Every structure is written in structure tokens, then in C-alpha cells.
Image: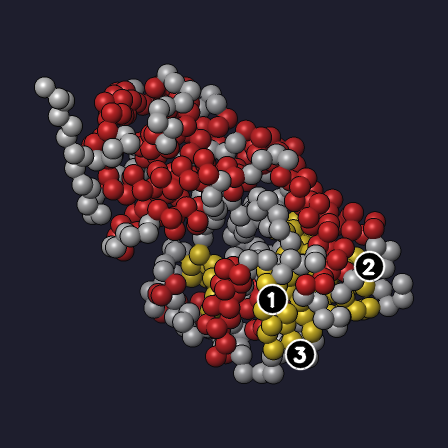
Amino acid sequence: MKPVHSTPPKLTEASLAFALLRAAAVMTRVLREGRSLDQALAAETKGVKTPQALGAIQDLAYFGMRNLGRGQVLTRLISGKALLNPEPLNELMALGFGLLWDDKNPKYPAHTVVDQMVYACTGSEQFARAKGLANACLRNFLRDSNTWRSKALEDPLAQHNLPVWWIEKLKTSHPQHWETMLAQAQSHPPLVVRVNTRSSSASAYAEQLNAAGLEARVIGEQAVLLAKPVPVSALPGFDLGQVSVQDSAAQLAAQLLNPQTGQRILDACAAPGGKTGHLLELADIELVALDSSPQRLGRVEDNIRRIAPTLNGQWDLRLKVAQAELLDTWWDGVPFDGILADVPCTGSGVVRRHPDIPWLRRPDDIAKLSQIQHKILNALWSTLKPGGTLLLVTCSIFPEEGPLLAKAFLDNHSDALAQTAPGWVLPVAAANPDQGFDASPDGFFYAKFEKSLTS
């Protein structure tokens, strides 16, 4: 007789098993294909019809990436294998162990996780043969979870849920704050909004939120922190351009450049457009916004379209798809009064918002990106008029993308005069006593340069 192969049961979108499989596939695309989390989510949610399933997949994918280290360590310890077969099973098991780790505030009951993990394997041709292994490993953990946690925590990967090289880099770069930074990287980011001063003030908007039952408080000149994140659709005035989502540290960029009415300003590397919109809100300017990606520049356009009804002055925005350092492809020869150079970087300061970043980066990426940063700054400096201002911005907490980059720029340009700027804004509230942040911001670096009137 020929063996009978049963057809795997079809998982419904309403099941946790369905979301587990899709979320694990997202993690696999990040770790084994080098996709960003956003790209991987877009690929794995094609055809998913229900908002509930879409929300569950995204939530689990972000959770899985934030808890990846301990999930990987437990998978290795309990299975006794360095790598499971098929390889994507490693991500599914890591996700499952991540969900079981916290027995005090679990996302789902333990028995539900085990049951749905086994059901996910059963419903997948790829993992059907692994359902016994998954069931045995997960139940093994639950039988003696405290012992397994203790064993796992002997590995820095499980302690901090970040690659070991990343941990060591932070330890040497920030010996006073590295542990707090690592803990912050695993946390859920707060919802901070930027109030459009053409429409309201931070204090007035905070009062409006509180009156609507959304607890909020002012934490910056235009920054309001909500006690609990909500969908943007729940924010009063969001669709009208009266408020935008932007971290308090990122809001410093446009304020530091301080655009004035009638000036010609360049926003280099503009996507996704938060700083672009902020510049237009602050003054009636002529603004050129660059990005090398047409898709990302489309996001800039969408953001500006949303706030456009509030911009009643004489402003002018020109969007250009171009690499900032290739001047011949975009610059018309007319110099700028101000330049916002938000150069490409590792993103080491925004890991809590993008938990895929440390897993996509490699140690030598820092040096590679530093070379690109130098090229962009050197090129942009030639487009700045004498007396103009260039603001260097990176969302990084690595020295090569902060103080060392700024120093090298000054050393190479005798006509560059350093101006007052925050320098590092670290993702630790106590590390920024002069910035006025009473909540933990994202990590950024700011340096400001004025071009000498005489070279």
C-alpha cells in the first residue's frame, strides 16, 4: 500500500496559529534575507484580509524581534541543536519561547501558546514533521522554567536580546549608561507627537487630549507625550495636519536649524518626512527635499500633503529623487541658506522603534556608513552659501557617527565654524540634564556648523 499523506488543516486568520506562522516568517525574512522589518511585514501580510490578523502578525513580529536573543538561546539549549531543520523553524521556536518567557505578565496563557504552536506546525507543510519536537521542547521548558531561564541568562544574548558585538560596542562607547540603553532598546517606544504651532500650542493640545480621555503631558517646546499609545486616527486633528508623530529628540532638528521666512533650505535624506514637515511648519521657505528612494520620497509627499492645509504662507517644496553626494544629478547651482543633513547611519539610537536594526547590521557597517557620511557632508558643504548653517543629524549613539564624525568634518573644512548644538541626545533621560527631557528620548547626535563669510 502507498502511504497516505494527510493534507495539513487550513489555518483561519482568526487563529493565533496563523499569526504565529506569519510572524515567524517575517522574522525569517529579516534574519535570513536581510529584509527590514517593514519590508518583511509587507511581504508576509499580502492577502491577509482581516485587520485583527494584520494587527496580530505585526505585534508578534515586533515582539519576536525584541525577544529574539532569549528565544534563540532557549531553542539551542532545550533542543540540543545549534540549528534546527528546516532553518525557518528556528524563528518559530524562538517566537514561541519568547512568548513563554514571562510567566508574570504573559501575552498569552502558556497552554494556549503551546497548543497554537503545535497547531501551527500541523497546519504547515514546512513544519508538519516538527510538531512533536516543538511540543516536547516547549513543554520541557514549562516543566522547569526557572532553571531554563537561569541557564539561558548565562548568555549575554539572552540577557539583552541583542547581538554580542552590539552589546560590547555600547559598553565601550557609553560605560556609564550602556545597561540602561540596552534595557531601553527592548522596551516599547512611547507615543510622542509634535504639535503644529500654526494650529495650536503643546500645552493647549495636551489639554485637548486630556479632555478627550487621553492622558498626556508636555515634554518639550512642541512635544506632547501620551501615557498610552493610540492609533493616529484617535489623535484629534491628525488628519488635518495639526499634529504629527515624532519623537522629542527628533523634533530638535528643525528647531536647531531655525529656518526663517524667505530662506532657501535643503533637507538632504528627507524620508520619511517628519523633519521636512516640521521645517515647513516653522517658516515660509523654499525647501528642496532629497531622498535616493522614490518609494521613500513618496512617504515624504504623503506627510506634506497631510499638513499642507495648515501652510497658508508663501512656501515652496521641491522633491527630488537623488543621492545627496551626487550634486550633478540634482543641484541647480543656487546656494542654500540652511542645510539639514540627516545622513544615513546605523540607526543605533532608535532600536526600540526598529528592533530589526541590530540583527541587520554587522560590525564593519559602522566604518562603511561613516565613509558615506563624510562624502555627503563634504558635497553638501559646497552648496551652502557663506554665512549659512549646516546641521548634522544622525539617529546614532556610536561615536563614529557622532562626535568623531563632527570633529573630522571640522578638521577638513577650515571655513566651518562650530555652533552651539546638543551633541549627543542619549536614550536615557538622566543622561541629558541640559536638554530638558523628563522622558527617555530616542538616541540622536546633533552638530551645527556655520560657513565663514571669508574662506
Q: Where 203 sits versus 28, above or below?
A: below
Kindly identify the amino acid type of the residue bearing the numbered disc 1: Lys
Residue designated by label 3: 261
Categorize mark 1 by other alpha carbons within 10 Å: few (<14), some (14-19), many (20+).
Answer: many
Kindly identify the amino acid type of the residue bearing the numbered disc 2: Leu
Q: Is residue 14 left or right of residue 426?
A: left
Question: Quadrant of residue 128 in the image?
Answer: top left
Quick one: SS at disc 2?
Answer: strand
Q: Quadrant of the N terminus?
A: top left
Residue designated by label 2: 417
Which x, y percent locates residue 184? 50, 42
Q: Where 345 sits versus 118, above or below?
A: below
* Disc nearer the start of the sequence (1/2): 1
Mark seen at residue 49: none
Quick one: SS at disc 3?
Answer: loop
* Disc nearer the start of the sequence (1/3): 3
Specify the color scheme.
secondary structure
Kindly identify the amino acid type of the residue bearing the numbered disc 3: Thr
Q: CA distance from mark 1 to mark 3?
A: 22 Å
> Does residue 386 appear anywhere in the picture?
yes
Picture residue at 35% right of the left edge, 24% below the top? 85
Cβ atoms under marks 3 and 2 closer than 8 Å? no
Picture residue at 59% right of the left edge, 63% below the top? 321
Cβ atoms under marks 1 and 2 closer than 8 Å? no
Residue designated by label 1: 320
